């Protein structure tokens, strides 16, 4: 109740700040930048061969899914449940705390809309509907630039906290030499 009241008070007494923050959070939700919650995704990516070789990521899924969502609106009754889930879930994340972990549950549905977009683009090309194809491709380019931009100067390169966490792990295990190495890397990084 306390935090709900604080949130409602913020919205009512600072609508411009709320709107500005909501726009930023919408941008962050649809951006390819992976916002970590408690472990730096970019740091641990170095230790995962699978993540490094995956050809697709949010950098392409986000813009394609946005095109797919727009293209599906002409048959919105057919896709009502999926559209409702994507929009309501995304909105619920935007109201609170945007990070990659909370974006993950909507990802399979975004992949479906990405596939829908690719199928529609193929159909437009096959039927010779070049005007529709061009418009859809233009939308894709705009969403691609939006999803892969860095308007808020997000930093992927500072791993100080990750090295510090590894140092703590090695310290707990009694490996003082490795702990010291990680702590020195954290100091150097910071």
Image (cartoon, grey):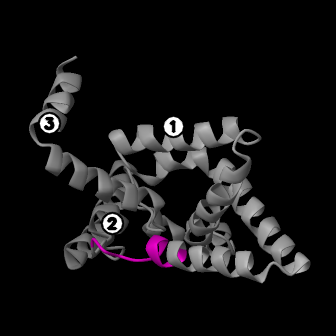
Q: How far apart are marks 1 and 3 (CA)?
A: 22 Å
Span shown in magenta: 144-152
Picture quadrant of residue 14: top left
Picture quadrant of residue 3: top left
Percent coordinates x, y for residue 121 in the rendering: 77, 73
Percent coordinates x, y for residue 91 in the rendering: 44, 41
Residue at (62% x, 51% y) in the render: 107
**Which residue is nearer to you in this view: 181 or 23?**
23
Q: Distance between the residues labelled 2 and 3?
A: 36 Å
In this rendering, position of residue 169 left or right of residue 132: left
In this rendering, position of residue 43 left or right of residue 62: left
Choose the circle earlier in sequence order: 1 or 3: 3
Q: Name the residue under label 1.
A: 88
> Up-down: is 58 above or below 188?
above
Choose the circle earlier in sequence order: 2 or 1: 1
Percent coordinates x, y for residue 37 in the rendering: 38, 50
Q: Name the residue under label 3.
A: 10
Residue at (60% x, 74% y) in the render: 140
Say what secondary structure mark 3 lies in: helix
Q: How far apart are marks 2 and 1 (CA)?
A: 37 Å
Residue 163: image tag: 2
> Up-down: is 90 above or below 144?
above
Say what secondary structure mark 1 lies in: helix
Check if residue 145 falls in the magenta segment: yes
Q: Residues within 10 Å of mark 1 (few under 14, many from 20)?
A: few
Which quarter of the rendering shows the C terminus?
bottom left
> Up-down: is 151 above or below 97?
below
**Tags 2 and 1 in contact by the CB under 8 Å rule?**
no
């Amino acid at each position: 109740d306390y935090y709900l009241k604080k949130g409602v008070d913020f919205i009512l007494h600072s609508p411009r700040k709320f709107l500005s923050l909501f726009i930023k959070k919408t941008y962050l939700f649809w951006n390819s930048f992976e916002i970590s919650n408690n472990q730096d995704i970019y740091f641990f990516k170095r230790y995962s061969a699978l993540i490094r070789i995956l050809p697709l990521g949010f950098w392409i899924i986000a813009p394609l899914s946005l095109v797919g969502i727009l293209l599906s609106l002409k048959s919105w009754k057919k896709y009502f449940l999926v559209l409702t889930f994507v929009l309501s879930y995304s909105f619920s994340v935007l109201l609170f705390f945007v990070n990659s972990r909370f974006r993950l549950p909507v990802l399979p549905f975004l992949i479906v809309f990405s596939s829908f977009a690719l199928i529609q683009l193929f159909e437009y090309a096959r039927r010779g509907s070049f005007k529709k194809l061009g418009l859809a491709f233009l939308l894709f380019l705009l969403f691609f630039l939006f999803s892969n931009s860095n308007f808020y100067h997000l930093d992927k390169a500072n791993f100080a906290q990750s090295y510090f966490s590894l140092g703590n792990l090695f310290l707990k295990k009694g490996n003082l030499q490795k702990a010291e190495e990680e702590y020195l890397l954290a100091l150097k990084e910071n």
